Image (tube, rainbow, N blue to C red):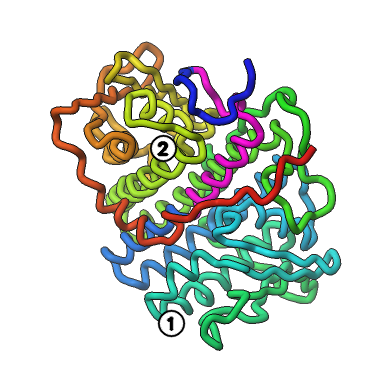
Amino acid sequence: MPLLPDYSGPFDPEVRLADFSREALARLGREYLLNGHLQDRVGLPLAAKRFGGDAYLELSIAEWMGASPVYSRRMQQALGFEGNDVGTVFKNLQLDIGAPPQFMDFQFRLDRPDYGEFWLAHCGALMDVEPFGEAQVRMMCHDIEDPTFDATAAATHPCMKMRPIHRPPREPAGRYPHCRWAVFIDDEATPARPHSNLAIVRESKLATIPVDVPPHDAEPGGWADYSGAFDPQLQLEDFSHRALVVVAQEVAVQSHLLSRSFLLAVGQKLGDAAARELAAEQWTGIAALTAERIREPMRIEGDGIDAIAKTFQIHPCFQPRTYVDWRVEILEPRRARLVLGDCAALEEGDAWSWFAGLREAPHPALDAIAGRVNPHARCHPVAPPAGARLAWEVVVDPQSPPQEEPHELKLARISTGARFRFEQRRLLRG
């Protein structure tokens, strides 16, 4: 069938990412990148509120150092740009949830294989933190970035370093660009020491799960991978249809890995009960925000059961399908069914994921997604069909009281990213 330019047409229970056009996948891919970035805006403040500011710093460092080397290597392998030079690091940054394009507007200059610089024309993270004062800026731009930047670079070369040329607090006030960093290989430096949690994250099923790779491009044009020269002006529109299907899935894996690394650190510090509690809250906040955001670029209109079903179907929290066996079907004009089959997401055997909290019971994240489309929608657990593990029915009852906005969503809205709108900066590459 023809590729879908958006999801404004009828709901189709068989639709997968590969059914969308390159242009639609580029729009959706940017939203997936921002989704992974903003989940931190929910989980870390909730941890700090419960356990103090020291927990924010410690958990932030542990989560990024435990996850970014894993997903950096995955993206290199997926798009064919494995290497050990600065250009490889820059390619990773262009496809990293830590640097969603435009919101974290990285600009690059590659001088030679062992040296380059990047700067941020716009740093959404700084815009979020600066109003809270210099101490918060220093914690993010110094205490957190120093070890986590080097951990990301070390995934490419053990002696790769990232060092600030200048960075916030901005002096003078309003300094532009917001920061500038040198990235270089220092062969005489002590190789970066990996975080102890990195090995644990690598042992998860998620870390090695394959993604669906279409057998061929369903649309002409674009790069099949990123094995060519580093392009400082890269946009998602530069990739082929097949490559964009892979990128979207790998970005979803990045989000799950980052959450897993965060919840692992929470469990180690505070116990698995705290990890389960924070997992439900983090998932609720980011799932609700992204449910709102993805509707506009994919042109999902209205508040009917079809709009709810479409939102659940393409939501990044339920990607990739190789990890999350997720099915959505419409039963009646005001009823849909969500089905979770036997899959790796339910087989990790620990408390360090969002899916570990799913039971034959209501879950606030599911209600939050449905409620952002229609506040009268609720998700009720039902008996799963044969071969499935869990199921819920989404019911829209106009007579029921509307859902209140989750407090976790209100927390996510504090970020300027909640209201950020992407631009299409380049037409599709032929």
Residue at far bottom of view: 172
Q: Is residue 250 magenta?
A: no
Report helix, strand or loop for mark 2: loop
Q: Position of residue 360 (x, y in %)?
A: 26, 27
Question: In terms of image quadrants, where is residue 253?
Answer: top right
Q: Residue at x 45, y 20 (%)?
A: 11
Mark 1 or mark 2: name the one nearer the start of the chain.
1
Q: Amino acid at mark 2?
A: Gly
The disc at residue 365 is none
Q: Quadrant of the C terminus?
A: top right
Q: Amino acid at mark 1?
A: Glu
Report the side of 188 relative to 355 (left or right).
right
Report the side of 168 relative to 41 (left or right).
right
Q: Quadrant of the N terminus?
A: top right
* Disc 2 crowd, CA 10 A, few/some/many (<14, 14-19, 20+): few
Near-viewer residue (229 or 255): 229
Q: Is residue 350 visible?
A: no
As measured in the structure, the alpha-carbon distance from the residue carrying label 1 to the one carrying label 2 is 41 Å
* Secondary structure character of the magenta stretch overall: helix
Report helix, strand or loop for mark 1: helix
Magenta-highlighted residues: 14-37
Q: Position of residue 375 (x, y in %)?
A: 24, 37
From this view, report whether residue 424 is shown above or below residue 391.
Answer: below
Q: Position of residue 337 (x, y in %)?
A: 33, 20
Q: Is residue 241 visible?
A: yes
Residue labelled with disc 1: 134
Q: Residue at x 68, y 62 (%)?
A: 154
Near-viewer residue (211 or 239): 239
Residue labelled with disc 2: 349
Q: Is residue 22 magenta?
A: yes
Near-viewer residue (181 or 20): 20
Q: Position of residue 198 (x, y in %)?
A: 55, 55
